[in-house]
Amino acid sequence: MACDNRTKVYLGYEDEYVTDKHRSLLNFTTNKLGGHPNCYGKNTLLPPQCRLCGLYQLLALQLYAPLDNSKYHRTLYIFACINPNCWNQNKSWTCLRIQHLEDETNTSVPDSGSVNVPSTTAWLSDADDWGDNVNDNASEPNGNNMLENDPLQFHFSLHKEIDQDIREELSTLRVDDPNANSPTSVDSPVSGGAVGRLDSPQASAEIDGDENEVVCIDTPTRPQCDLVSLLHEVTPLPLQIMNAEIKYAFDEIFLSVDEEDCNTDVSQHVRDLLVEYQHGNPDPSTKFAPDSGNPKTIETDVEKYEKGIPKHGDEMFHNFVCRIQRNPGQLLRYSRDNSAPLLLYPLSGCIGKCRNCGDEMTFELQVLPTIIPKLILNPRSERNFQIEFGTVLIYTCIRSCWSATDLYREEHVVVQAERL
């Protein structure tokens, strides 16, 4: 299971915790986990609101990601919602991209204020205007006169009178024949039948016959719990998190970046696993000897071992785990290539176009579940409180579209839940 030579992937690893001695060094080129966004100059980026619950999302990752042959500095800010009811949903994560020209770093720029992320409804500002004249006809002063002059109104009145006459005639109708429901002929004796009670306030029936032939019908009982409420029940948030006066953030940690190691050399751990596997599943055709020291033989046998279908049958998940284990400790994967993401299961639907310029989208970043233990709330709100997800995929505009008037651009996020 060798790496694709056409795809260069960069991996992010946990580094040193950010302390007060590092504060003066933080800027928009810092790769880090948690904390608060660091923007260019004196600009600030306020966290976006979750489109599912309305809570302000917390910064999970800040990545400096300039592109080759581009005149822009470029930083990605990835936010996550800590509400358990929003986990594993695309809208619980937000990726904002901010760019500025390289020559701007050499000139003094006045404070442009805060970059305030609009609320959910602001994205609908370009929606069609349906107008306020939907019910104009109903509000006209002569609206009732128009109905009265309608030639069909006479027919409605006539039908109403006929309907009233029919009701009066049916109210005098009585069924006194006890044999009306009998399946026998008129001349044969009747052994039983159902007789309707006209004076009963509710629908009922009496069945004639012996006591051992009477059928008892139990009255249904109402459910003792509200099933609809149970279906809509959600996990409550911890009281500490609901306190708006407390400003939460994930612990701030520097990220180190390294290129993915695609070396196919077999580690000692893999050797041990292979020996254990062969002892439990002896195969005469196996030519591997632990002490042989033949790299070609080892690599060939390991490839056979890894390409075998796992017992659970989920080859995609098996590939996901094996690829991550090649470089232990990785928290994220970066590569602007649509063949780079490791999926837990196939994507449903297409990624779509850039919401800003309409151009194609390309994969750029993947957040791995190994980052979950690092996303620790500060100040501590609840013991063992951890966010949950399977993996998070970030797709960005292939042109990285930007204009001088932009404050930020939002990119596309895909969240895959952990397979149970």
Image (spheres, rainbow, N blue to C red):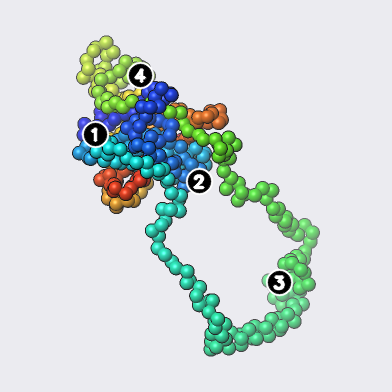
| Picture disc at residue 211 | none
Q: Is residue 161 above or below residue 322?
A: below
Task: Give the distance between the C-alpha atoms of the residues marked 3 and 1, in whole angstroms.
Answer: 84 Å
Q: Give the residue type at disc 2.
A: Gly
Label of residue 54 in the image: 2
Secondary structure of the residue carrying tag 4 is helix
The residue located at (50%, 31%) in the rendering is: 377
How far apart, in angstroms, are the residues tagged by discs 1 and 4?
28 Å
- Image point (35%, 46%), residue name: 407
For the residue marked with disc 4, what is the amino acid? Leu
The residue type indicated by label 3 comes to: Ser
Depth check: give the residue in front, 368 or 203: 368
Image quarter in which the N terminus is found: top left
Judged left or right of residue 197, residue 246 is left
Return the x and y of residue 177 as percentages of the image width and height: 75, 77
**Residue sitting nearer the eye, 38 or 174:** 38
Location of mark 3 (residue): 182
x then y, percent, for residue 288: 26, 17
Q: CA distance from mark 3 to mark 2?
A: 67 Å
Q: Real-space Cα distance between discs 2 and 1? A: 38 Å
